[in-house]
Image (cartoon, rainbow, N blue to C red):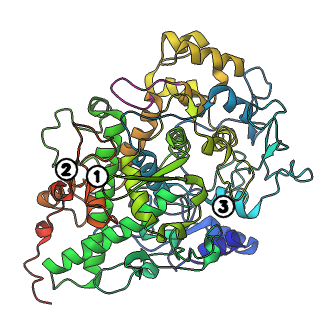
Amino acid sequence: MLFGYLFILYQCTRLSHGLVYDSVTGNPASDSLIAFYQEKGVLASCTVDVKPCVESERRRVDGTCNSLKYPVSGAHSVPRARLLPAVFYNGSYPRRSVSGKELTPPRLTRTSMLRQGKSIHPELTHLVPGFGIFMFSDVGSAHDTVNMVTRRTNCCEKEHMNDYGCTPNIIPDDDPVLRYTNIRCMNSTRPMTFQEFLCTNNSVPIPYATGTPSRDFSQIYNPQNLGSDVIRTKSGGLLVTEVEDGKTWPAGGPLTACPLNQPGETRCFRYYANTLLPASIFIVYFVRFHNYIAKELAAINPGWDDDTLFYTAREINIAASQQIYIYEWHLALQGEDNLKDAGILSKSWINPDGFKDEYDESKVPSITMEYTYAIRWFHLMQESSLKMYDETGNYLREEPMFNYTFRPGFLTKNNNINYATQGLFRQASRAADHSVSFGVSEQGLPIVQAALDITTGDVSKGRYLGMPPYVDYVQLFTNIKITSFQDLTKRWRITNEQVLLLQEIYEDVRDIDLIVGLWAEEPMKYGRIPATLASILNDDILRNRKGDRHLYENSKRPNAMTRDQLKEIRKVLISTVFCVVGDGVTEIQKNAFLTISPENPIVSCSKIPKINFNAWYDKNAQKA
């Protein structure tokens, strides 16, 4: 019911009387094609309605017209780009080994490559995977997960195992964990495709996606593609919020959207995604951060109307999130030298407040399938439990993280959001040391399913998404052609121990799954993540710079920031957000993605940089 309600609601908001474009091709839809879609009842799923683009307009909430040449490319529900062509067997089935045999089943692949247990990263905090999840929700989509959890829940039943939409992960009898249980299957579903909605007859499956493919903070400003009107108060540029027990929350909605809330837990977001716990926390804080910005702007410019306040606050909020994502989160993961080599940072880094005018109107603003898939590597850094601390850092207790998926009501009770927030920046993340936590590998949805191995699902999804082999990506980014298992050690960054494990699973080095290769690869020099993963993530940043004409660093975009305004954005850290709107946060380490240390000590929020909104002073708006 929940899935059906959300999907119907989503479809009903898709069309609004503009030029109708075909979602798959990106071209204007012909009358005959529109008639076909109408006859089949899929017009809203297969088309995007685009009002005429205006070169001087601000960034649209629906993502259209991010590119004037390709107006539909930034919209919801358009195909993602690919770095390499999809690889399937027999048209739409998981690729096979070079020899033609089926690949080792996903669960056995996972248990062979990743041991299960505790792990602590010496330098990175729990905030790293938490913020990564939240930023992914801008460009990713959870419809396949919702499909598995609420709609197609029976893929492990004998009569449904072979349904086309089902891709159950079989548990071997000698499974190292589940051998003593009666669990021999984990529910899993085939990724939904544009073909299922009759949007194309292309023989190669094109995965369906519901988020915008460029970074526009759609998880805050266009949730479920409902537009911004439903989340705005239409007064003072503010977003709709409610107050409960002295705390400000996004607008509440029916509890049917939060099926795992427990008795007494009544908070459920009306418009925003009710998914993973860290993402829910950041939704709360960035909604509050928008309203904080709007109020500061209104105090400086009392003559600004609601629209001016809303859109300016939105631009600042988007810019702040991207500043944190690119220049703090990625810096913690890759290091300065690697970001310079990738072209993300300037080689000199002398003028960090300067603009980066790299926009190219011929480029398409699009996330890649590889990005939305490879980000799953961060499951290795996800701890099963979140440690809860009080405001001064005293340890209180641990909470099982995955028990609070689809359950934002937990945050409103007993100051849980205060204590969980402290845990995000005080607790270390897991080390990516070829291991996985018990929660990720066995209890991904403990209240919903008896067993769910998220990392097994990662292997399976990669195959059903048509991801080419790992070695193809090594060659793409480095021009190193891997032709043998020995090359992985001699010419690349995989240890002999990991190569031996890979040889147990794969007949040929060209069979290695992308995600499994990323698991096996050692961290890059001067960095903390694999180089191949970094290359996929960096490609996303560079694509966004070149393809999104509204990027905050572009001095030539409509309503571009001044140099003084950009300097203020450059000051923003994730600790800035926590100090301004975080519940109970009065002290924090300046770089909250890195663990507390003598070099990165806990300091008062008074020492954390904040935006000086005087940079937005408008002399013509001083009378209300």
* Above or below: residue 437 compared with residue 159: above
Q: Quadrant of the N terminus?
A: bottom right
Asked if disc 1 and disc 2 are in contact, CB closer than 8 Å, the reply is no
Q: Which mark is residue 584?
A: none
* Above or below: residue 540 compared with residue 290: above
Q: Which mark is residue 355?
A: 2
Q: Earlier in the sequence, mark 3 or mark 1?
A: 3
Q: Residues within 10 Å of mark 2 (few under 14, many from 20)?
A: some
Residue at 35% across / 34% down in the picture? 334
Alpha-carbon span between mark 3 and mark 1: 31 Å
What span is colored magenta in the figure? Answer: 521-530
The answer to whether residue 523 is magenta is yes
Q: Secondary structure at mark 3?
A: helix
Q: Is residue 236 left or right of residue 504?
A: left
Asked if disc 3 and disc 1 are in contact, CB closer than 8 Å, the reply is no
Say which of marks 3 and 2 sits in front. 3
Q: Secondary structure at mark 2?
A: loop
Q: Earlier in the sequence, mark 3 or mark 2?
A: 3
Q: Earlier in the sequence, mark 1 or mark 2?
A: 1
Frontmost residue, 353 versus 258 = 258
* Above or below: residue 47 compared with residue 102: below
Say which of marks 1 and 2 sits in front. 1
Q: Main secondary structure of the magenta part?
A: loop
- Which residue in the protein does label 3 denote? 146
- Which residue in the protein does label 1 denote? 323
The answer to whether residue 298 is magenta is no
- In which quadrant of the rendered view does residue 337 lie? top left
Q: Is residue 64 visible?
A: no
* Amino acid at the residue labelled 2: Phe
Alpha-carbon span between mark 3 and mark 2: 40 Å
In x, y percent, where is residue 364?
43, 51
In x, y percent, where is residue 368?
50, 45
